[in-house]
Amino acid sequence: MDSTTTETAGQGLRERKKLETKQALAFAAMQLARERGLENVRVQDIADAVNVSRRTFTNYFSSKEEAIASLNTDRAAQSAEALRERPAGEPLADSLAEVFAAPYEMAAKVDREQVDAIRMMVFTPALFGEYLKTLVQAEEPLAKAIAERTGADPQGDLYPHVLAAAVMAAVRAATGHWIANRGARSLPDVIREAVRQVAAPSTNPSTTNPR
């Protein structure tokens, strides 16, 4: 193995370790907030739970709220790449529905702890702003992927940006609806329905079954 290969491998290992540390801090923040209440958790408590220094925490996050919201950032950030990997001939609405439902596929078997974690993310005022940031940050890369898929101009055409924003809003609305209805249906199915309603509006039940 030459020196260049060794250096590249070393960089790859360091990046993996950094990602593992970041994710561990995020999960620790969520777990502690669920157990104690967000207001009773200090940054030092999170660092201690992962056995790292407070300075290490601040290398990754500016606050405990950002740390918790990053769990959603990771999911949202993968959506654009996941869309690119869907079958080319698949209807765009179906592709988007599957892309956003997939990370929650196990939610049909979700336990009480996970329900509380999702509820905290969506309905805790101190976390909600950070949660919205994660959705907004995901819009631009998703819009680019939609433009690639549809042949639109990612700069000049409005459609990819409007659809990306609508899809992210649909995911948020679906999650809130699922929580409000105490998980009566599986979260992936609720997300699929919501995404299809904005990506293919003609499938909206209210347009075919008016009250």
Image (cartoon, helix red, strand yellow):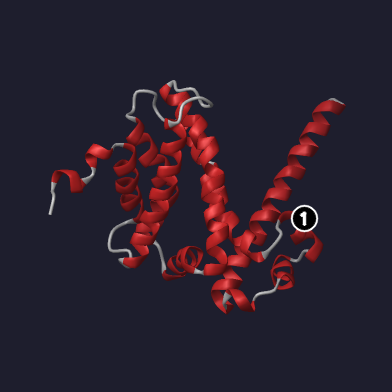
Give the residue displayed 71% in from the left and 65% down from the top: 50
If the image is split into quadrants, where does the C terminus sit? Answer: bottom left
Residue drawn at x 60%, y 55% is: 70
Residue 53 visible, this orientation:
no
Q: How many marks?
A: 1
Q: Nearer the viewer, residue 151 or 99?
A: 151
Q: Within 10 Å of the Cα at label 1, are there few (<14), some (14-19), or many (20+) other Cα atoms? A: few
> Which residue is more in the foreground, 2 or 142?
142
**Residue at the image position 44 percent from the left and 46 percent from the top:** 168
- Residue 67: where, in percent of width, then height? 64, 60
Determine if residue 11 is in view.
yes
Can you say which quadrant of the picture contains the N terminus? Answer: top right
Residue at the spot x=34%, y=38% of the render?
A: 199
- Residue 106, by quadrant, is bottom left
The three-letter amino acid code for the residue at tag 1 is Asn
Residue 110 horizontal/vertical position (percent)? 40, 62
What residue would you read off at disc 1? Answer: 59
Where 160 falls versus 51 (above or below)?
Answer: above
Q: Quadrant for residue 152, please give it.
A: top left
In the displayed structure, does residue 71 sit left or right of residue 203? right
Identify the element where label 1 is drawn: helix
Residue 41 x %, y % = 65, 75
Measured along the vertical axis of the image, is residue 151 above or below residue 40?
A: above
Horizontal relation, residue 95 to residue 3: left or right: left
Q: Position of residue 74 (x, y in %)?
A: 57, 48
Q: Examine the rendered structure and indicate whether residue 185 appears above or below residue 100.
A: below
Question: Observer-nearest residue: 37 or 4?
Answer: 37
Judging depth in this view, the residue of 30 and 168 nearest the camera is 168
